[in-house]
Image (cartoon, rainbow, N blue to C red):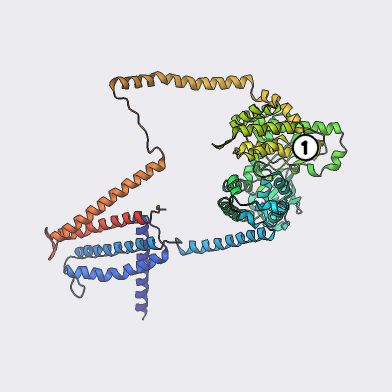
C-alpha cells in the first residue's frame, strides 16, 4: 500500500516536471506566454501520451521485446525513446499555440491572476465611488459629454463649479491636490473654475502619536532620542499626506518635522491610476477633454505627485532656493529654512522652524505696520521673485499666501518647497522679451515674442491672436482689476496654444504672487511695477559679459563647421568629376524600423529553414536508405525523423508569429 502511494507521488511529480518543461519550452522557443492551467493540462496530456508512443516506436523498430526488455544496446533504445518524446512534445507545443491563438491567456499564473483580481476589485470600487460622487453632485455628465454636444454647464445656473469643489473635497487627498493644481491653470480653465478650485483644502484628522513616532524612527533608523532632543506629540498642522510637528535637535535648534502618513503612498498610487483612467475616458468622450489634453495632464500630475511624496527631492529643492536667496539682494527680505540631512529621508523632512504667521492669517500684524513699510515689503518681494524667475531661473512655483510666513522682524519666510520651477536660459530670454513687449504695449512684438516660447498649432490664426493680445494689453493697462499674466494665459487657452511646463510654472507663480502682494499692500500695482522692473532684470540677464560669452561660443561652433567645409566640398566635387556622386536615403533610420525589418527577415529565414528541414526529413524517411542503425531501421530514416522534428518546431514558431503576433516577454 505504501509502495503504491509513493509510486503515485513520483508519477505526479514527473507530470509536474513535464508541465513546467513544456511551458518553458513554449515560452523560450516560440516566444509565447501561456497560462499555467492550460500548460498543466497539455503537459499532463504529453506525459500520458509519451510512454505509449515511445513503446510503439521502440517496438516497431524492434529495439525492445514485447515485455519491454531491450534487444539492442541501451543507448540506441534511449535514442528512439528521445525521438518519440520529442515528437509528442512538439505536438503538445502545437496544441498550446493553437489554443492560445483561439483563446488568449488572460493571466500568466494563478498568483498574478489573484493579485490582479484583488487590484482590479479595489480599483473598480474606487472608480465606482468617484462616479457616485459625481452623480451625487449632479456633474456626472462631464465624463460622458459627447464632442459637439450642448454645454450643460450653462444650463445649471453656474452651480457646476461649486458642485465640482464639493465632489473633489469628498474624493480625498489626491483629487484635492489635482484640484489645487487646476486652480492655477488659467491656461486650461476659465477664471470661475480656478477661483472655485482655489478654495480646496487638503485637511485631515490627525494620526495618533505612536504611528507618527514609528515613521520617524524608521526613517532615522534609530530611536527618537538619537537625533531629536524633543518632538511635540501634538501636530502643528495635519493634511492628508503628512503631519507637521515641532521639535528640537540635540544641539537645541528648533525645527519642524514633516512626516508622511504611512498609507499615503499606497493611497496616492491607487488614486493616480483612477485619475489617468478617468482622463482617458474624458479625452475619448468629450471635446473639452481633447482640447485640454486630459491624459497628458493626468500623467504629468501623477509624476509630480509621486515626486512630491519623495521628500529627498524637496530637501534638494529647499537647498537650491536657499542658495539662490543667499546670493541675491533678496536675503534682506526672504528667509529660507535650513534642512538637516541626518534628520531627513524619503518620508521625513526636518528644517528650521520659521517663527511667524502665514500671510493669509497675518491681518492683525500687518495692520500694525506702517503703510510705507508694507509697500516696501511688497516691492522687495516682487523684486525677489522676478530675480528668481528671470535672472537665476530657479524659483518657488507655489508661492501662495499660506507658504509665506510674516515674522516679527518684518521679514518673510518661505516654506513648502515641494514644487520648484526651473526655467532654462533660452526660455528666460523669451519670457523677458515677452514682458518687455507687453510693457511697451506693442501687440505685434508681444505676438512674435509669445510664438517664440509657446507651440502654436498648424492652423493657428496668428492675426486673430495678435488682435486678442492687443485688446488684452489695452484693457489690463487701463483697468485696476485683473492681472496681465492671468489675462495672457486666458488668451493662450482660447487659441489652443501649448505652453511649455517650465514657462507655465513661471507665469502661474507670478499669478499666485499677486495674491500675496495684495495682502501685503492692497494699493500695490503689481502689473505696473513688474513691467517697469523688466528692463532692470533684462540688463542683469543679458550683460556684456554674457553677450560676449554667447558670441564666443557661437563663433567656436561656426569655426568648427567652417573648418570641415573644404573637405566636404572637395569630396563632393571629386565625386562629381568621377561621376560617382550619389545621394543615399536612409529608409530605416529609426531603431523600431530596423528592428521590424530584422524580425521579418529572421522569421522568413526560419520559415525557409523549417520547410527545408521537413522536406529533407520526409525524403530521408521515404528513401529508406543508408546503413542499418538496427535491424529494420536505416540510419537515414532515423536522421530524417530527427531533422523533420526540428523543421516542425520552426514551422510552429512561424505560425505563432502569423496568428498571435505578440512579443516575447
Front residue of 435/156: it is 156
Q: Residue furthest bottom?
A: 1
Say if 81 sits above or below 491 in the image.
below
Residue 522 falls in image quadrant: top right
Question: Which residue is rendered at x = 41% and y = 39% of the image?
Answer: 590
- 210 vs 149, left or right, is right
Which residue is disc 1 drawn over? 481
Question: Which residue is rendered at x = 63% and y = 34% of the image?
Answer: 465
Question: Which residue is rendered at x = 61% and y = 38% of the image?
Answer: 499
Residue 441 visible: yes
Question: Which residue is rendered at x = 73% and y = 53% of the image?
Answer: 157
Q: Residues within 10 Å of mark 1 (few under 14, many from 20)?
A: few
Residue 63 visible: no
Residue 91 falls in image quadrant: bottom left
Residue 88 image offset from top left, x and y in percent: 28, 65
How many numbered discs sit on the rendered protein? 1
Residue 126 image offset from top left, x and y in percent: 61, 60
Front residue of 477/638: it is 477
Residue 111 image offset from top left, x and y in percent: 48, 63
Residue 299 image offset from top left, x and y in percent: 57, 48
Q: Secondary structure at mark 1?
A: loop
Residue 462 falls in image quadrant: top right
- Quadrant position of the N terminus in the picture: bottom left
Amino acid at each position: 500500500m505504501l509502495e503504491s502511494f509513493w509510486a503515485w507521488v513520483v508519477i505526479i511529480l514527473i507530470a509536474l516536471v513535464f508541465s513546467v518543461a513544456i511551458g518553458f519550452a513554449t515560452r523560450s522557443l516560440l516566444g509565447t506566454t501561456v497560462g499555467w492551467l492550460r500548460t498543466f493540462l497539455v503537459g499532463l496530456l504529453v506525459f500520458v501520451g509519451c510512454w505509449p508512443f515511445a513503446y510503439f516506436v521502440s517496438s516497431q523498430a524492434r529495439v525492445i521485446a514485447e515485455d519491454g526488455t531491450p534487444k539492442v544496446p541501451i543507448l540506441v533504445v534511449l535514442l528512439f525513446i528521445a525521438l518519440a518524446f520529442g515528437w509528442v512534445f512538439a505536438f503538445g507545443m502545437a496544441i498550446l499555440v493553437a489554443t492560445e491563438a483561439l483563446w488568449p491567456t488572460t493571466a500568466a499564473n494563478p498568483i498574478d491572476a489573484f493579485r490582479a483580481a484583488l487590484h482590479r476589485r479595489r480599483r473598480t470600487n474606487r472608480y465606482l465611488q468617484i462616479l457616485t460622487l459625481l452623480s451625487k453632485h449632479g456633474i456626472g455628465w462631464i465624463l460622458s459629454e459627447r464632442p459637439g454636444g450642448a454645454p450643460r454647464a450653462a444650463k445649471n445656473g453656474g452651480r457646476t463649479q461649486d458642485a465640482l469643489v464639493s465632489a473633489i473635497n469628498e474624493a480625498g487627498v489626491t483629487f484635492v491636490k489635482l484640484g489645487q493644481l487646476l486652480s492655477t491653470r488659467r491656461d486650461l480653465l476659465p477664471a470661475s473654475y480656478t477661483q472655485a478650485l482655489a478654495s480646496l483644502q487638503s485637511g485631515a484628522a490627525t494620526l495618533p502619536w505612536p504611528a507618527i513616532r514609528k515613521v520617524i524612527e524608521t526613517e532615522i533608523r534609530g530611536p527618537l532620542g538619537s537625533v531629536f532632543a524633543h518632538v511635540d506629540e501634538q501636530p502643528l498642522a495635519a493634511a492628508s499626506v503628512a503631519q507637521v510637528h515641532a521639535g528640537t535637535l540635540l544641539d537645541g535648534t528648533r525645527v519642524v518635522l514633516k512626516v508622511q502618513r504611512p498609507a499615503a503612498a499606497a493611497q496616492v498610487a491607487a488614486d493616480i491610476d483612477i485619475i489617468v483612467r478617468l482622463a482617458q475616458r474624458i479625452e475619448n468622450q468629450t471635446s473639452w477633454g481633447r482640447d485640454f489634453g486630459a491624459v497628458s495632464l493626468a500623467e504629468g500630475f501623477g509624476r509630480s505627485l509621486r515626486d512630491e511624496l519623495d521628500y529627498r527631492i524637496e530637501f534638494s529643492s529647499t537647498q537650491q532656493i536657499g542658495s539662490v536667496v543667499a546670493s541675491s539682494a533678496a536675503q534682506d527680505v526672504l528667509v529660507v529654512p535650513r534642512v538637516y540631512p541626518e534628520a531627513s529621508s524619503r518620508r521625513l523632512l526636518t528644517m528650521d522652524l520659521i517663527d511667524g504667521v502665514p500671510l493669509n492669517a497675518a491681518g492683525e500684524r500687518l495692520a500694525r505696520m506702517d503703510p510705507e513699510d508694507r509697500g516696501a515689503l511688497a516691492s522687495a518681494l516682487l523684486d525677489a521673485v522676478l530675480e528668481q524667475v528671470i535672472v537665476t531661473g530657479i524659483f518657488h512655483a507655489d508661492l501662495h499666501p499660506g507658504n509665506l510666513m510674516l515674522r516679527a522682524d518684518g521679514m518673510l519666510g518661505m516654506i513648502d518647497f515641494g514644487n520648484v520651477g526651473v526655467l532654462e536660459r533660452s526660455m528666460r530670454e523669451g519670457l523677458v522679451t515677452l514682458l518687455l513687449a507687453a510693457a511697451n504695449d506693442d501687440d505685434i512684438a508681444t505676438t512674435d515674442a509669445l510664438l517664440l516660447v509657446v507651440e502654436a498649432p498648424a492652423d493657428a490664426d496668428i492675426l486673430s491672436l495678435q488682435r486678442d493680445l492687443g485688446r488684452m494689453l489695452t484693457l489690463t493697462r487701463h483697468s485696476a482689476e485683473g492681472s496681465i499674466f492671468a489675462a495672457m494665459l486666458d488668451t493662450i487657452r482660447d487659441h489652443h496654444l501649448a505652453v511649455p511646463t517650465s514657462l507655465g510654472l513661471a507665469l502661474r507663480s507670478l499669478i499666485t504672487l499677486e495674491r500675496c502682494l495684495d495682502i501685503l499692500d492692497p494699493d500695490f500695482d503689481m502689473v505696473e511695477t513688474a513691467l517697469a522692473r523688466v528692463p532692470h532684470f533684462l540688463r542683469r540677464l543679458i550683460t556684456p559679459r554674457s553677450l560676449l560669452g554667447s558670441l564666443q561660443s557661437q563663433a567656436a561652433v561656426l569655426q568648427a563647421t567652417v573648418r570641415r567645409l573644404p573637405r566636404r566640398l572637395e569630396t563632393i566635387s571629386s565625386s562629381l568629376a568621377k561621376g560617382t556622386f550619389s545621394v543615399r536615403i536612409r529608409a530605416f533610420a529609426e531603431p523600431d524600423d530596423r528592428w521590424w525589418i530584422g524580425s521579418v527577415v529572421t522569421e522568413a529565414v526560419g520559415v525557409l529553414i523549417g520547410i527545408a528541414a521537413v522536406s529533407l526529413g520526409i525524403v530521408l524517411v521515404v528513401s529508406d536508405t543508408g546503413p542499418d542503425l538496427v535491424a529494420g531501421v536505416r540510419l537515414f530514416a532515423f536522421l530524417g525523423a530527427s531533422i523533420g522534428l526540428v523543421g516542425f518546431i520552426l514551422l510552429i514558431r512561424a505560425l505563432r508569429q502569423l496568428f498571435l503576433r505578440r512579443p516575447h516577454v
